[in-house]
Each structure stands twice: as C-alpha cells, then as structure tokens.
Amino acid sequence: MKKFLFPLLSVAAATSAFANETTVCTAHGDQRVIELITDEPGCKVNYTKGGETKTLWSSARAEYCAPHAVEFIEKQKGWGYECTAKTDQAASPAQ
C-alpha cells in the first residue's frame, strides 16, 4: 500500500472523534479536491471540480467511504494529477 493512503485508512478507523481529510489534486493549472468526511457513525466523500462540489458517496457506516476515496484518488493520479493529502482531526463535541 502506498504511503499517502494511510491517513485515509486511519480516518476511517476513528470511532470516538470525527475526522476530515482533504486531498488536493493538481495538473496543468487544474485543481480538484476530494474530501473524506467522517462523523461517527457516518461518512461522505465530496468532490470539487471547476468550483462545483458533489457528494460522490455517503453512508451511515463510517468505514464505507475511505476505500472509495482512496480508489478515486488513485484514478486522479492515473489521469496525471499530483495529489497531496492533509488530515484535520478533532475530538467529539462535549456530551
């Protein structure tokens, strides 16, 4: 497994906190953004291209989205995009 995939997989494993990961892919002046948003117990994957954001996947199960996000990032790389990921994790809100 490639090094950049580990943050996405660790995000999916988070159980007591929400975690978001944004991956920015660029090529020839074009920028695309893939966001993995995990908020216990669910998740979604948003994709921004040309200033328009669409939700590609969503589920009530947090573990569902990460594999789809990883696969989609791999497709971007296959199309010649260079992708960089960053993770934003925060503790669950006080109960």
Image (cartoon, rainbow, N blue to C red):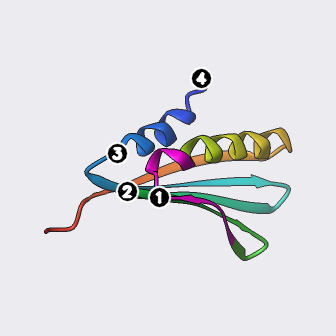
Please say whether residue 90 is one of the residues in the magenta stretch: no
Cβ–Cβ under 8 Å for marks 2 and 3 = no
Q: Position of residue 79 (x, y in %)?
A: 86, 44
Q: Which mark is residue 41?
A: 2
- Residue at 72%, 61% in the rendered image: 32
Question: In the visual, does 66 lie left or right of 74?
Answer: left
Q: Residues within 10 Å of mark 2 (few under 14, many from 20)?
A: some
Question: In the visual, does 78 lie left or right of 45?
Answer: right
Q: Tell which circle, 3 or 4, labels the residue nearer the N-terminal end.
A: 4
Identify the residue position indicated by label 4 in the image: 1
Q: Which mark is residue 14?
A: 3
- Residue at 47%, 58% in the rendered image: 60
Specify the quadrant that holds the N terminus: top right
Q: Is residue 56 above or below residue 23?
A: below
- Residue at 64%, 45% in the rendered image: 68
Identify the residue position indicated by label 1 in the image: 60
Cβ–Cβ under 8 Å for marks 1 and 4 = no
- Range of residues picked out in magenta: 54-65
The type of residue carrying mark 3 is Ala
Q: Which mark is residue 46?
A: none
The type of residue carrying mark 2 is Pro
Residues at marks 3 and 4, CA–CA distance in whole angstroms: 19 Å
Residue closer to the observer: 55 or 59: 59
Residue closer to the observer: 50 or 46: 46
